[in-house]
């Protein structure tokens, strides 16, 4: 079947099926199972109202359970097993031990830590700077949408964009990558293969993610800046505070909670970073990260055990943020 | 606030200039790729995109002399032009790669065996030889020439219609749309019902479920890949569109439920309670009141999910096959980066085709995107 027709059919079946399920199940509940009539009308209404929420939630719960909750446990189980022939054999922590002996794993850990520190910090800082700068400009909205734009670009597309910037031609030829063009023009040195200089190449990859994420930080922080009560700023001005003092001592402390939210959100994105590394270096020249390491294990080395162990490490790193988010959500609910 | 103490005019200039710099820094990378996608292969490989508008003096790839020879004054002569299209001005030329600028335009060079070659400024050349050139290996001409800026749409027609990495970008474009559109639409309704239950229905365990949704928001989908692929193989759908639609639906649901619940909680209580008093069923309240009122939240989620599924690489690599009828734009682009890494006219154009739709969605629906981000800045 032509995929396009299949797509239209799936949309029709998916949406139609959902509508039909919700409509029919409600109808069944109200007309057949517990009709709000007859001798037990009151009891029936109460019972129907107890069941209804679960009818509404059922499809979502099945999908969430199957596609997100179950895999967490399945991956954990897989990480404790190894393929022996066609069967799985329990091997305890062997997969983890094997992973710990691999240099590539520790390289990924080191790089992930670097990413975790640099990218959220830089993206938040640039976002805050952009939010503050554009706040009172006449063309601020235009500037914002330009800085926000990379959000729409795929990681792979962004990788192509930045690879052109880092492009390097042999010395003596005219450089077509702007970074080398500027570098050669300013220093007179030979052009560099930016993505092949160990350690520093990590930073060149991180720039791509900072470029993408800064717009997100800007949008959120800009709204937070607008929410600051004017009186606090006016009072500071009357007391003789300069613009920098106002920014760092009055505004930043007041939007601190938002900064934390932005920071953690970007942190989660960073932990999952995969496309950029795959597209630009594929983990060569000491740029490996956990997500790409895991992908290598799963789908190139077909080592499901170690791949699952690597996935569990990513899960482990996300867990503190998960707990913190749940904690905050519960606080808000109360 | 504009003209009171603390806002110096000098500082406002600094603000203007810094903002301009920042915006340039953020726009130029994309702009460079955009410009490159309209340049010819020669121009891209010999000069940076920032010089696309200037007439450039550059070394051109060597061109071997060819043409039909005529006999004149006892000599064999080949006349011709290096640049049939015209518009190119030669400033220096040579016949070896070691000395590509040995002669000035208009000069005549004595080559071996009495052969002479002259190249004029407009690219016309004359080669004379005492013997017939039929068996001779004719010299190559290296030229340093200034060519006018040249822009072309050929890159786009090449990339869209002709197979490069085994498959044309046009096909990949359709595949991506096939993935993204159902994967955007299907989760919305499922999430909307669930969000309504979590926002406006009282039942035991509600708080726990909300907490679970928040927790699932940050679960890395990396964990889901292998178990789900096994699951898909087990139920017999294997790799294919059905699998990826289901996967994207599952992965998109936490954000959808979270966003929609946050929005629905903020709807005025009076409307819903009045409707309940008037005897509307929950199903009617949902379809007639909540759904229309939640349109902004539905739109912001739809935009997120569309951008996410259109731009996704990992889920597509795992859940789709590798055939031409299933490879998506991002996967195609990664392949091209590997196999045609130096062909910037192809890469730039393909990348631009792939980011075009998200950019259009972004610029036309930015309002909803911002609103959605502010409502649920978690994913």
Image (tube, rainbow, N blue to C red):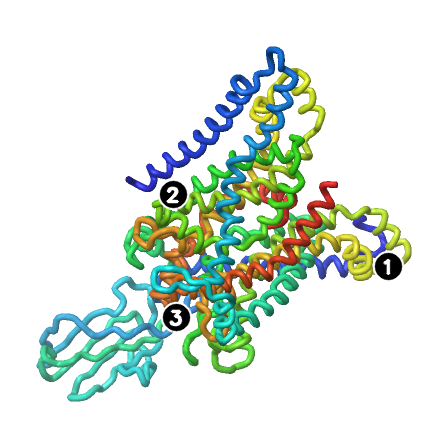
Whether residue B50 is visible, yes or no, is no
Can you say whether A6 is above or below A51 in the image? below
Q: CA distance from mark 2 to mark 1?
A: 61 Å
Q: Which residue is mark 3?
A: B46
Q: Quick check: A264 above or below A33?
A: below
Q: Residue at x 61, y 59 (%)?
A: A267
3D distance between C-alphas at marks 3 and 1: 54 Å
Q: Which residue is mark 1?
A: A241
> Which of the two marks, 3 or 2, is nearer to us in this view?
2
Q: Estimate the x, y position of residue B11 in percent, counting from the top left.
A: 76, 60
Tell me the SS state at disc 1: loop
Disc nearest the viewer among 3 and 1: 1
Q: Earlier in the sequence, mark 3 or mark 2?
A: 3
Describe the element under mark 3 as helix, strand or loop: helix
Residue highlighted by disc 2: B242
Return the chain for callout 2: B
């Amino acid at each position: 079947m032509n995929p396009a027709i299949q797509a239209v059919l799936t949309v029709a079946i998916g949406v139609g099926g959902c509508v039909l399920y919700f409509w029919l199940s409600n109808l069944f509940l109200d007309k057949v199972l517990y009709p709000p009539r007859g001798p037990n009308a009151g009891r029936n209404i109460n019972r129907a109202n107890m069941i209804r929420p679960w009818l509404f939630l059922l499809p979502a719960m099945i999908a969430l359970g199957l596609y997100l909750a179950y895999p967490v446990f399945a991956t954990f189980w897989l990480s404790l097993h190894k393929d022996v022939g066609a069967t799985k054999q329990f091997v305890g922590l062997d997969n983890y031990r094997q992973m710990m002996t691999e240099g590539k794993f520790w390289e990924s850990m080191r790089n992930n830590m670097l990413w975790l520190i640099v990218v959220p910090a830089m993206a938040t800082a640039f976002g805050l700077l952009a939010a503050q700068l554009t706040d009172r400009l006449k063309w601020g909205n235009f500037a914002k949408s330009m800085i926000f734009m990379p959000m729409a670009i795929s990681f792979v597309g962004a990788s192509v964009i930045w690879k052109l910037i880092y492009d390097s031609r042999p010395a003596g030829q005219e450089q077509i990558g702007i970074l080398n063009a500027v570098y050669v023009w300013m220093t007179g040195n030979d052009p560099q293969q930016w993505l092949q200089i160990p350690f520093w190449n990590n930073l060149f990859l991180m720039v791509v993610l900072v470029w993408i994420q800064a717009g997100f930080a800007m949008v959120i922080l800009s709204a937070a800046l607008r929410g600051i009560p004017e009186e606090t700023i006016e009072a500071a001005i009357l007391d003789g505070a300069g613009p920098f003092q106002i920014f760092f001592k009055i505004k930043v402390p007041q939007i601190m909670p938002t900064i934390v939210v932005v920071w953690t959100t970007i942190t989660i994105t960073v932990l999952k970073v995969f496309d950029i590394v795959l597209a630009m270096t594929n983990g060569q020249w000491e740029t490996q990260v956990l997500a790409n390491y895991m992908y290598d294990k799963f789908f190139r080395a077909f080592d499901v055990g170690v791949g699952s162990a690597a996935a569990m490490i990513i899960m482990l790193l996300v867990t503190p943020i998960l707990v913190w988010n749940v904690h905050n959500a519960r606080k808000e609910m109360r | 606030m504009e003209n009171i103490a603390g806002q110096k005019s000098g500082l406002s200039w600094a603000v203007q200039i810094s903002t301009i710099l920042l915006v340039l820094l953020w726009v130029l990378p994309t702009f460079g790729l955009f410009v490159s996608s309209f340049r010819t292969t020669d121009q891209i490989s010999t000069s940076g995109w920032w010089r696309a508008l200037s007439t450039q003096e550059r070394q051109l790839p060597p061109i071997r002399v060819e043409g039909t020879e005529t006999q004149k004054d006892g000599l064999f002569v080949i006349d011709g032009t290096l640049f049939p299209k015209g518009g190119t001005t030669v400033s220096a030329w040579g016949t070896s790669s070691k000395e590509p600028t040995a002669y000035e335009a208009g000069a005549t060079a004595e080559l071996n065996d009495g052969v002479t070659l002259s190249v004029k400024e407009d690219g016309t050349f004359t080669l004379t030889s005492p013997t017939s050139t039929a068996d001779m290996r004719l010299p190559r001409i290296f030229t340093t020439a200034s060519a006018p800026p040249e822009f072309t749409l050929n890159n786009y027609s090449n990339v869209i219609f002709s197979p490069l990495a085994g498959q044309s970008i046009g096909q990949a474009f359709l595949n991506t749309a096939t993935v993204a559109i159902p994967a955007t639409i299907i989760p919305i309704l499922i999430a909307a019902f669930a969000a309504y239950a979590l926002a406006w229905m009282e039942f035991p365990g509600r708080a726990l479920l909300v907490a679970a949704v928040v927790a699932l928001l940050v679960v890395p989908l990396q964990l889901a890949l292998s178990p789900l692929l096994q699951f898909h193989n087990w139920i017999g759908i294997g790799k294919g569109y059905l699998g990826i639609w289901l996967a994207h639906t599952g992965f998109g649901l936490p954000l959808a439920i979270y966003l929609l619940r946050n929005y629905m909680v903020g709807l005025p209580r009076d409307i819903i309670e009045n409707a309940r008093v008037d005897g509307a069923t929950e199903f009617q309240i949902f379809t007639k009141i909540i759904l229309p009122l939640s349109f902004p939240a539905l739109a912001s989620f739809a935009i997120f999910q569309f951008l996410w599924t259109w731009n996704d690489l990992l889920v597509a690599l795992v859940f789709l096959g590798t055939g031409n009828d299933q490879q998506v734009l991002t996967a195609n682009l990664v392949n091209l980066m590997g196999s045609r890494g130096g062909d910037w006219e192809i890469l730039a154009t393909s990348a631009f085709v792939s980011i075009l739709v998200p950019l259009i969605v972004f610029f036309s629906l930015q309002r909803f995107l911002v609103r959605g981000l502010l409502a649920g800045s978690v994913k």
